[in-house]
Image: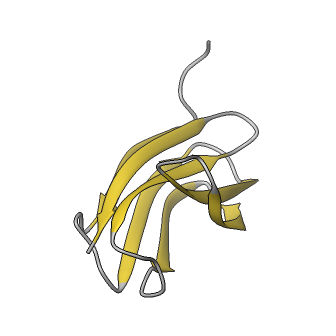
C-alpha cells in the first residue's frame, strides 16, 4: 500500500452526545463518504462528502442516536479511516 492520503484524524468529543466533529487532512481533493454503523454492523447513516486538499472539518449531528458505541468510517477512493465513538 502507498502512503496515506488522509492523515491527522481527530474525532471529538468522545464520548459525545449532541454532535461529533471529524477533522482530518487530505493530500488531494476527492469525493468520499462518512458512514456510521452500530456494533452489529448495521448502517445507521451514510453521507457523501467533498474532501478538499488540506484540512477538512465535518460536524455530524448525533442527537438522534441511541446511547451506545458506534463505528465512524471515512472512505475516499484512495484511503479509509475507522474510529469508535461512544454516544451518551
In the image, residue 84 lies at what x, y percent?
37, 50
- Give the colour scheme of this rendering: secondary structure
Q: Residue at x 38, y 73 (%)?
A: 20
Q: For the N terminus, which image quadrant?
A: top right
Q: Residue at x 72, y 54 (%)?
A: 32
Please determine whether, in this image, residue 26 is positioned above or below residue 70: above
Examine the rendering and report whether any part of residue 52 can be seen. Answer: no
In the image, residue 13 lies at what x, y percent?
24, 69
Please determine whether, in this image, residue 3 is positioned above or below residue 56: above
Examine the rendering and report whether any part of residue 42 can be seen. Answer: yes
In the image, residue 74 lies at what x, y percent?
58, 50
Residue 62: name its quadrant.
Answer: bottom left
Residue 51: name its quadrant.
Answer: bottom right
Q: For the C terminus, which image quadrant?
A: bottom left
Relative side of 18 to 40, left or right: left
Relative side of 88 to 20, left or right: left
* Picture mark count: 0
In the image, residue 11 lies at what x, y percent?
34, 59
Relative side of 84 to 2, left or right: left
Q: Residue at x 48, y 42 (%)?
A: 82
Relative side of 48 to 63, left or right: right
Q: Residue at x 22, y 66 (%)?
A: 15
- Name the outermost residue toward the front: 40
> Considering depth in this image, is 34 or 37 the residue closer to the camera?
37
Amino acid at each position: 500500500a502507498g502512503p496515506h492520503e488522509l492523515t491527522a484524524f481527530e474525532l471529538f468529543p468522545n464520548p459525545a452526545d449532541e454532535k461529533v466533529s471529524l477533522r482530518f487532512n487530505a493530500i488531494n481533493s476527492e469525493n468520499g463518504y462518512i458512514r456510521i454503523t452500530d456494533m452489529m454492523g448495521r448502517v445507521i447513516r451514510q453521507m457523501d462528502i467533498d474532501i478538499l486538499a488540506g484540512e477538512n472539518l465535518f460536524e455530524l449531528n448525533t442527537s438522534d442516536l441511541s446511547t451506545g458505541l458506534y463505528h465512524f468510517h471515512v472512505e475516499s477512493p484512495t484511503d479509509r479511516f475507522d474510529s469508535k465513538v461512544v454516544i451518551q
